[in-house]
Amino acid sequence: MAFDPIQEDCLRLILESMRRDRIYPLDDAMYIERAMERFREDPAQLITCDRDRSFHLMAKATEILDYRTPFLTDEAEIDRQESLAQNHLKEAIELDASNWDARRMLAALDAPSNDAYVSYLLDNRAAVERDLAATIESADDAYSREFADDLARRPLLRWLAATASRAVIAGQYRLALSVVEESLGYAPADPGGIRHTGMLALAKLEAPLQDLKQYRRRHAVSYQIAGPLRRRHHMTEKALDAWTLLAEMSASYRSFDYAGADRALHQLMRAYPDAAEPLYFQAEFPDGLFARVNIVPGSQDELILALSEATPLLQEGIGAPDNASFASWIANHELIRRAMQGRTQRTPGHVGRTGTGGDN
């Protein structure tokens, strides 16, 4: 459901190593295993050109920004790590001006506001697409074609995913949904999970429950997983994920179908282990700058991530003195209270982002 920067770095370096050593076919298992071992020992052994060095630096910056600093508590260390990551990104761009992941991440760090970042993404999308088209057109051997068919396309998918997710934060729900539909048309398997952003955008546009179900049917490929290894052609639909269940819960809650909202909440608590505490506190997790952070599907971490991204939904009702917010309805639900019994009594903090009104 997410892009792994280290894995992608490894794949890119192995492909270039195969090109240099003229290894074919490209699925030579023994060669790949040896190259992976070299990567684990020291990736620098496989880096021979500026483009690969650039991506490697960007991957190192991602490790810092998306997987290290969110868990640090010392402000001085956070500043030091972020400065190191910024230097990695700047050097990556100097080495390869077409490293759009590095450009996008640096823009996210430097943007004065989320709206400014969305504008940057919209203004520069065409340049990303032009570079990709040039890469595809110039692919004249097996190695270049392999790169063009997959790895070269991923920066554009991440660009679109960032545009959609930040548009939701900016309250531009129609823009977000439009970008999601474009991305899913371009890559129906949805390796980055942009479908989840589309589900949240639909919910914020006050789509009825039936429209949410039609959205899943329309993008059925992205909601499927391969069956057992010996039955690779069998496809099985995944159980409903946290984003879908939160959207369905919101749709039912908004239409005063509290029985339907109760069912969705019950499903959510059955689907995720120890769901009560995340649903009670609804902590906000920082957005991944490279892509949605890589977490285990079906885990509590996935639920926490989905709740954080669903902050605009959770804030529905805030500001109406005679109407409790959706977030409060969830946190104070009988199912949550029962599950939280016996825990130390704590008061939930501030929930989510502010300023989520948008172009409904």
Image: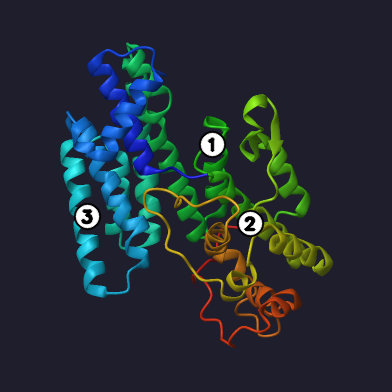
Q: Which amino acid type is marked by label 3?
A: Gln
When the figure is inspected, residue 155 is found, relative to residue 243, above or below; the finding is above
Q: Quadrant of residue 154?
A: top left
Residue 214 at x, y = what percent? Answer: 74, 42
Note whether 352 is above or below 178 in the view shown: below
Other residues around mark 2 within 10 Å, as few (<14) / some (14–19) / many (≥20): many
In terms of secondary structure, where does tag 2 sit? helix
**Is 14 or 192 nearer to us in this picture?**
14
Q: Give the mark nearer the N terminus: 3 vs 1.
A: 3
Q: Secondary structure at mark 1?
A: helix
Between tags 2 and 1, which lies in front? Answer: 2
Residue highlighted by disc 2: 242
Which of the marked residues, 2 or 1, is nearer the chain's N terminus? 1
Q: Residue at x 64, y 33 (%)?
A: 221
Instruction: Pick whichever, 128 or 340, lies toward us.
Output: 340
Is disc 3 placed on a helix, strand or loop?
helix
- Image coordinates of residue 181 in percent, x first then y, are 57, 39
Q: Quadrant of the C terminus?
A: bottom right
Q: CA distance from mark 3 to mark 2?
A: 33 Å
Q: Amino acid at mark 2?
A: Ala
Residue 255 appears in view: no
Please name the amino acid that badge 1 sits on. Glu
Residue 258 is left or right of residue 287, and the answer is right
Q: Position of residue 332 (x, y in %)?
A: 69, 80
Q: Which residue is mark 3?
A: 86
Residue at image mark 1: 182
Asked if the residues shown at circle 2 and circle 1 are in contact, with their CB atoms under 8 angstroms apart, the answer is no
21 vs 262, left or right, is left
Q: Is residue 119 visible?
A: yes
Residue, far bottom = 345
The one of 210 and 86 positioned closer to us in this rendering: 86
